[in-house]
Amino acid sequence: MKTGQNEKIQFSLRSKPSVHERLTEAAAWRGQSLHAFVLGAAIREADEVLARRDRIELTPEDAEVVLRLLESEAAPNAELIRAFQKRAEVLNDHDH
């Protein structure tokens, strides 16, 4: 759900009194309101979850394979050769 940058939405949470007390105590220790404390923790967790979603993690063996492939000088395939030839033709057409 995306909203305008300055638009604000409101949501509420329900919890056991003991959870509320614990969060309130932690927020006070940090000098924050309960709202700021909970929202900050939720944003940090969301950022971590989304970063994990977007990150590719390789085993050491897989990382070795990827590095070897990146460092090798592979010969261009037929499609790449045709693309470079077409590029050269286009550039030559513009020069004349």
Image: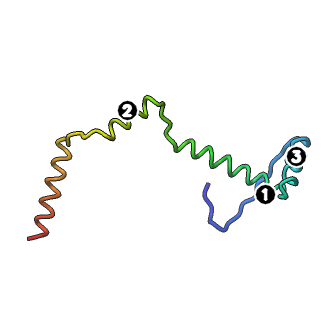
User: Is 78 left, or right, of 61 in this rendering?
Assistant: left
Q: Amino acid at mark 3?
A: His
Q: Earlier in the sequence, mark 2 or mark 1?
A: 1
Residue 16 is drawn in which quadrant?
Answer: top right
- Secondary structure under the numbered disc 2 in the rendered image: helix
Whether pointer 2 and pointer 1 mark residues with C-beta atoms closer than 8 Å, the reply is no
- Toward the viewer: 29 or 42? 29
Which numbered circle lies on residue 20?
3
Please tell me how crowded label 3 is: few (under 14), some (14-19), or many (20+) other residues with Cα within 10 Å: some
- Specify which label sits upstream in the sequence, 2 or 3: 3
Neighbours of disc 2 within 10 Å: few (<14), some (14-19), many (20+): few
Quarter of the view holding residue 40: bottom right
The x and y percentages for residue 2 are 60, 58
**Amino acid bearing label 1:** Ala
Q: Is residue 77 above or below residue 42?
A: above
Residues packed near mark 1 inside 10 Å, few (<14), some (14 to 19) or many (20 plus): few
Which residue appears farthest toward the bottom when viewing the image? 96
Q: Which residue is found at the position 76% from the left and 54% from the top?
A: 11
Residue 19 picture location, percent across and down = 87, 42
Q: Which residue is painted at 48% across and 34% down in the image?
A: 58
Amino acid at the residue labelled 2: Val
Residue on which the image places disc 2:
65
Left or right of 82 in this view: 16: right
Identify the residue position indicated by label 1 in the image. 36
Query: At 89% across and 49% down in the image, what residue appears?
Result: 25
Image side of residue 9 versus residue 28, left or right: left
Mark 2 or mark 3, which is nearer to you?
2
Position of the N terminus, as image quadrant, is: bottom right
Q: Secondary structure at mark 3?
A: helix
- CA–CA distance between discs 1 and 3? 14 Å
Quadrant including the C terminus: bottom left
